[in-house]
Image (cartoon, grey):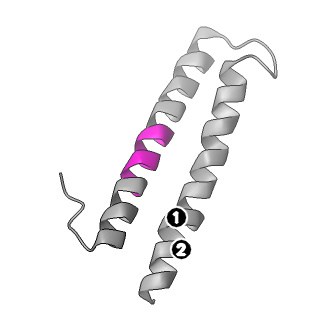
Amino acid sequence: MTREELRRKLRHDLRSPLAVILGRAELLLEGVYGELNADQRRSLEVVARNAERLTRELEAVAEAFDEGTDPSP
């Protein structure tokens, strides 16, 4: 895999599905598709929180990759 292919995977192939997951979770949490019970709401909040966290981590890795630095904290 070339450097450009890896960059594309980080920026698009991994981040785009996460954006869809997060977007759908937010729509559900907003009640667009109907009321949620407490357990459903808590589960979706976990999904949304982890999708946001993973998106931030992917962005940090992609930025470090672009700069040629180590993405470790």
Query: What x and y, as percent, mark residue 8?
Result: 53, 74
Labelled pair 2, 1 in contact (Cβ < 8 Å): yes
Q: Main secondary structure of the magenta part?
A: helix
Helix, strand or loop under label 1: helix
Q: Is residue 20 magenta?
A: no
Q: Which residue is mark 1?
A: 11
Q: Which residue is mark 2?
A: 8
Q: Is residue 58 left or right of residue 16?
A: left
Q: Residue 41: name its quadrant.
A: top right
Q: What's under tag 2, amino acid-wise?
A: Arg
Q: What's under tag 1, amino acid-wise?
A: Arg
Range of residues picked out in magenta: 51-58
Residue found at x 20% / y 66%: 70
What is the spatial separation of the Cα atoms under label 2 and label 1, in whole angstroms? 5 Å
Q: Is residue 52 magenta?
A: yes
Helix, strand or loop under label 2: helix
Query: What x and y, as percent, mark residue 55?
Result: 46, 48
Q: Which mark is residue 63?
A: none
